[in-house]
Amino acid sequence: MPKLLQLQHIRKTFPGVVALDDVSFSIAEGEIHTLLGENGAGKSTLMNVLTGFYAPDSGSLLLDGQPVRFSSPRDSLALGIGMVHQHFMLVAAHSVLENILVALQGVPLFFPRRQLRSRIEQTIAEFGIELELDTPVWQLSIGAQQWIELIKLLMRDCRLLILDEPTAVLTPQEADKLFQVLQRLKQQGKSIIFISHKMREVMEISDRVTILKKGSSVTTLEAGEFNQNKLATLMIGGDRIPEWQKSLPFSDELVLEIENLAVRNDRGLADLDNFNLQLKKGEILGIAGIAGNGQKALAEALTGLTKVESGRVLANGEDITRSCARSSYIAGIAHIPEDRKAIGIAPDLSLDENLILKNFRAKRFRHGVFQSRSAIRNNAIEKVDQFAIKAGPQGSPVRLLSGGNIQKVIIARELSEQPTVLVALYPTRGLDIGSAEYVHKVIAEGAGNGMSTILISEDLDELYKICDRIAVIFRGRLIGYADPTSSSREEIGLMMSGEVSA
Amino acid sequence: MSLAFRVEKRDQGSALFRSLTIIASVLVALFVAGFLLLAAGVNPATAYLEILREALGSTYGISETLVKATPLIITGLAVSVAFRMQIWNIGAEGQIYMGACGATGVALFSGLDAPLMLPAMFAAAFFAGGLWASVAGLLRARWQVNEVIVTLLMNYIAILLADYLIYGPWKNPDGYNFPLTAQFVDAARLTEYFNTRLHSGFFIALFCALAVYLLMERTIWGYQIKAIGSNPAAARYAGMKTGLAIFLVLALSGAIAGIAGFSEVAGLQHRLQHGLSPGYGYTAIIIAWLARRSALGVIIVSLLMGILLVGGDSLQLSWQLPVAFAYAFQGLILFFLLAGDFFINFRLRWVKEDADA
Ligand SMILES: Nc1ncnc2c1ncn2[C@@H]1O[C@H](COP(=O)(O)OP(=O)(O)OP(=O)(O)O)[C@@H](O)[C@H]1O
Ligand SMILES: [Mg+2]
């Protein structure tokens, strides 16, 4: 197949960091090419070099065999290379249509809006995407927002589409939909670069896989040459995957009881409706459900971030329904939020400072009102080591870390004060397999020490592997509990779609 | 084919690069201003030497530079504290006036004696400035009213209030009807040094810089200010009370600006009078912006501004250049400093491109 784009010995450094050392590979026309690599391996940086967001220090790009140099994403877009970023940004107050129009500005000059609208609708229909053009963006889930980004690229008729961890924010159903769209694009002769940490997806969709390790391309394999194990071994290289064991059976003592909880969302619809749940000491309770069925509201109600309409939350018998984030009961609840960038980190502060965001008042981090710099530094050293966080130079803003490493910072922080209850929304989303295993290990060990976990996830594999019980949520109600040792995937799947109750 | 240039975003430059850019900006500004001087029939080289000699070439010059820099440092710090939380205090000017009013009220009417008088004036200025700004703080924290507008509009009120006092109830009875208060007694005056106008206000300014540095970089309060400035939603989620913090930071910012008012009346003017501040509170915004986040930066930029103010005055005197010239000159320097700031973040690259591309 003719080569669309070739990368040769690309190198890119940032002050104090070698993000890309030596990367070479090529993308053929009409292929789906997956990039695989650990958190911080340089995948996003490479894509940013490819689209002209960063200029490489050395190395060259050949498009159709001709050397090219992009000085901004606009240049690469003009030549048909488009990207959906790992952390995209839309104008929240504007409608879907307006957001798309902004991106299309100047494409067909002075194109009448009505005609554009029908073209957009056509594209949406052609790919079978479900999206209402007049909805304001803030009302949409992150997954739906990602579709907008994709539609922008489809409208521009790109030859090469780059998708940086698109499935991290999609439900499994949405991910399937995305794969259908990608296959269709491939049939039209378009090339796709796909990034994901989920091996199953990689196996399913890739024509070729290039493995990136510590900023260098290791190898490129054709479909048929690889399986999950081989990819994992190549990607991890010498690093070890942490091992852990499921904790002992938990006690019968109740740490958290949710009684008839009702929560309404910004749109005034019920997110949770007459929801009941019981969490026992040392238990890992999975919440299975298709995203958008009240999981986020549940987490936010528990952590005092959302107003509860009616019902009660009891922690050790104490009513905490109306406490705020600062209260001592809630302080014992750690929360790994869904929208990491929005509420998980203070992007301009350093890694050290972000690791103490929640417990900066703790005695060990201060002398009176003065912060103890050495204690804060040591805490960071410890966490970086424990969670294998790939940190930049000391003191540099945490927003410069890779997506997965930011995620690890949040998890490390939330788990540092030995919480009694952990509420984790999709905690391993965007983590490489080693890191995901480590997070499971920490949760399992925590459970051994009496920490109770509510693990909200769509990944049934994950739930099966680590949970003691699985509660299924559908349209804001608890459908029932399932036992991972005896219930089948099909049963849980049916419960998730609200069809049967256990 | 044609030759064109493109703007490219560049990686954050090193500290050295930043400093060099600032120096280069000043040089370019001097170069451009040189043409203005030439047009006015003045040799630019002589004029610049004159500025430097005036501002730095004698004890008197240096003292005057420091005198001008004093209120700029204090108000620059005031504004920068709020900037760190992404709160825009445009009202330092008014807060200077309120601080000055507070200090003057104590000086004229308290009847206190030497050891107590100055601390009482200081406290009054601090609270007056703080209270004034806290109005904006309350509106912003409680009802999300934009602090830029409130602080800005309150400047006019503060200046008129000061005018009312000096034209009305506080007017010096023996002052031949000039809009001035009576002169302060000795106990209400800051010490002066070297037979110049340099007064302890300058050291208060340095002390403020140290205090602000410690507050911002070392304390848990500074930590919260920075965290909220970086991401209010994350800070709230982590249990910080962002509303209260906004209120307190605006109040603190105003209180610091109030100190500048104290320093001006107790150290320099020894009375409250019309036109107390020729816009220090506005210059402070630019100073805080150029200095970015550092208290040391505020001192350095303020000293630079001090040199410009003193040297610019001398141009007027030596060559009878119009006042407007001094302003144009300062404007140019600012313009190029801001432009230089752009080049810290972006670079221009010449590219050949096809006409139809
Ligand atoms: N603008 C930047 N300034 C400094 N360092 C950066 C910058 N962008 C990326 N890095 C560093 O480069 C390295 C590679 O980051 P990159 O985001 O490419 O990783 P990634 O492979 O996409 O990881 P993930 O799977 O976690 O998304 C990381 O160590 C990161 O901290
Ligand atoms: Mg990435």
Image (tube, rainbow, N blue to C red):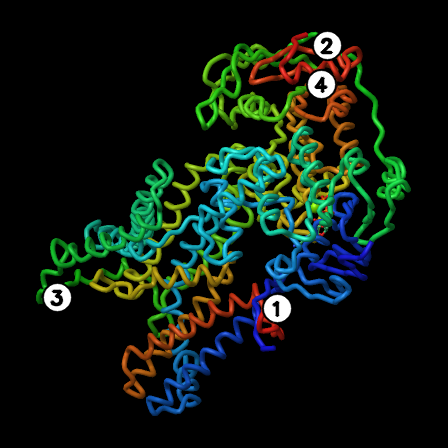
Q: Is residue B76 above or below residue B116?
A: below
Cα–Cα gap, marks 2 and 3:
85 Å
Please give the residue where the numbered disc 1 appears in the rendered image. B16
Q: Secondary structure at mark 3?
A: loop
Nearest to the eye among marks 2 and 3: give it.
Answer: 2
Q: Residues within 10 Å of mark 2 (few under 14, many from 20)?
A: few
Residue B197: % across, % down:
33, 71
Nearest to the eye among marks 1 and 4: give it.
Answer: 4
Query: What residue is at 50 percent from the left and 40 percent from the top?
Result: A96
Cα–Cα gap, marks 3 and 1:
52 Å
Query: What residue is at 56 percent from the left and 63 percent from the top?
Result: B345
Chain containing mark 4: A
Cα–Cα gap, marks 4 and 3:
80 Å
Please give the residue where the numbered disc 4 appears in the rendered image. A284
Query: Does label 1 point to a residue whose CB lies under 8 Å from ligand 1?
Result: no
Cα–Cα gap, marks 1 and 2:
61 Å
Q: Which mark identifies residue A251?
A: 2
Residue A498: % across, % down:
62, 14
